[in-house]
Image (spheres, rainbow, N blue to C red):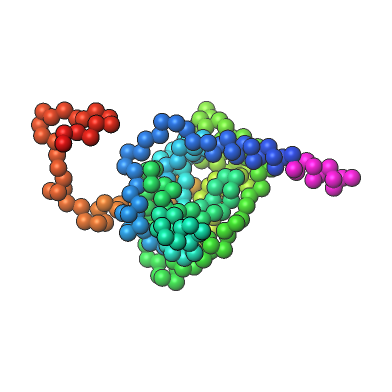
């Protein structure tokens, strides 16, 4: 009897959790990227093991950006051609799954790069990795495909329905890890952090001084943070990830720009300008 009641309760909580996750994933209207990503350029620049940060516009994205004081609310790992093409994507490179990410309500999934062509993005590239290191990080993420998270921890989900809680800045980041339940791990960049920790690659290590050492002989010891505390912003702030700007990588020359003549009026929105 107790087992039946527990199963009924879990089913009820699962149903509520899925409904809450669906509402949190709804996109808000009016989102306009400053510099939308270009699929062709991104495809030419990205390398397996790169972390793609995304400025999302869903309800949960607003909360994460506020709590982390960052532009970036989502992170995905680029795996290149490591995954087979899905049905119907074999003849269209835009639909080939080249990113692995973790989404609230979905879990760990593979998606095409074109999914984020209308979003502001940033490429964060780990420095100094060997080909074997990159393959290990990619293999870690591929091995987690299909991993789903339990959404029964309702309290972990509720925090994201209050996107701007009146708490001091120094406490906002900790609200991401509040409870440390499955919805927390599903939203944060924990799986990507685990992939890099598996090859002992640092992201934002805590620096502590060795006890007993003299002031002149103290050595810094790097302690890897627990993966559940990482957010998309950390890959941007990490001193070990290089920010890659596709336009500059392809050879930018300001002399090639065409500027409007002095006194010329800017065309109205939707107006292609003079022909």
Majority secondary structure of magenta residues? helix
Of all residues, the one furthest to the bottom in this rendering is 132
Specify the quadrant that holds the C terminus: top left
Decide whether residue 84 is among the magenta residues.
no
- Whole-percent x, y for residue 93 in the image: 40, 58
Decide whether residue 10 is among the magenta residues.
yes
Residue drawn at x 28%, y 31% is 270
Residue drawn at x 41%, y 47% is 116
- Whole-percent x, y for residue 6 in the image: 81, 44
* Above or below: residue 163 compared with residue 6: above
Horizontally, residue 145 falls left or right of residue 272, namely right
- Whole-percent x, y for residue 210 in the image: 49, 59
Can residue 65 be seen here? The reply is: no
* Above or below: residue 215 compared with residue 115: below
Camera-side residue: 262 or 136? 262
- Whole-percent x, y for residue 191 in the image: 54, 55
Camera-side residue: 41 or 195? 41
Specify the quadrant that holds the N terminus: top right
Camera-side residue: 109 or 193? 109
Of all residues, the one furthest to the left in this rendering is 262
Horizontally, residue 1 falls left or right of residue 180, namely right
Residue drawn at x 39%, y 43% is 119
Stretch in magenta: 1-11
Q: Quadrant of residue 69?
A: top left
């Amino acid at each position: 009897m107790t087992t039946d009641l527990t199963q009924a309760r879990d089913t009820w909580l699962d149903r509520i959790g899925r409904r809450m996750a669906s509402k949190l994933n709804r996109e808000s209207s009016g989102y306009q990227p400053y510099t939308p990503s270009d699929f062709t350029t991104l495809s030419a620049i990205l390398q397996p093991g790169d972390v793609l940060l995304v400025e999302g516009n869903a309800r949960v994205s607003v909360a994460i950006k506020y709590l982390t004081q960052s532009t970036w609310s989502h992170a995905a790992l680029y795996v290149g051609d490591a995954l087979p093409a899905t049905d119907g994507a074999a003849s269209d490179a835009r639909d080939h799954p080249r990113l692995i990410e973790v989404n609230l309500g979905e879990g760990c999934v593979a998606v095409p790069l074109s999914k984020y062509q209308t979003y502001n993005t940033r490429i964060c590239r780990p420095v100094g990795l060997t080909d074997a290191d990159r393959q290990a990080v990619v293999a870690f993420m591929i091995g987690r495909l299909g991993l789903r998270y339990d959404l029964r921890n309702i309290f972990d989900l509720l925090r994201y329905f209050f996107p701007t809680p009146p708490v001091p800045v120094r406490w906002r980041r900790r609200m991401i890890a509040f409870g440390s339940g499955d919805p927390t791990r599903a939203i944060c960049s924990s799986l990507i952090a685990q992939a890099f920790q598996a090859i002992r690659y640092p992201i934002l290590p805590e620096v502590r001084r060795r006890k007993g050492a003299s002031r002149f002989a103290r050595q810094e010891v790097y302690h890897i943070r627990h993966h559940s505390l990482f957010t998309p912003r950390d890959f941007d702030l990490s001193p070990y990830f290089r920010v890659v700007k596709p336009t500059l990588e392809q050879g930018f020359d300001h002399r090639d720009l065409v500027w409007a003549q002095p006194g010329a009026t800017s065309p109205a929105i939707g107006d292609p300008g003079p022909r």
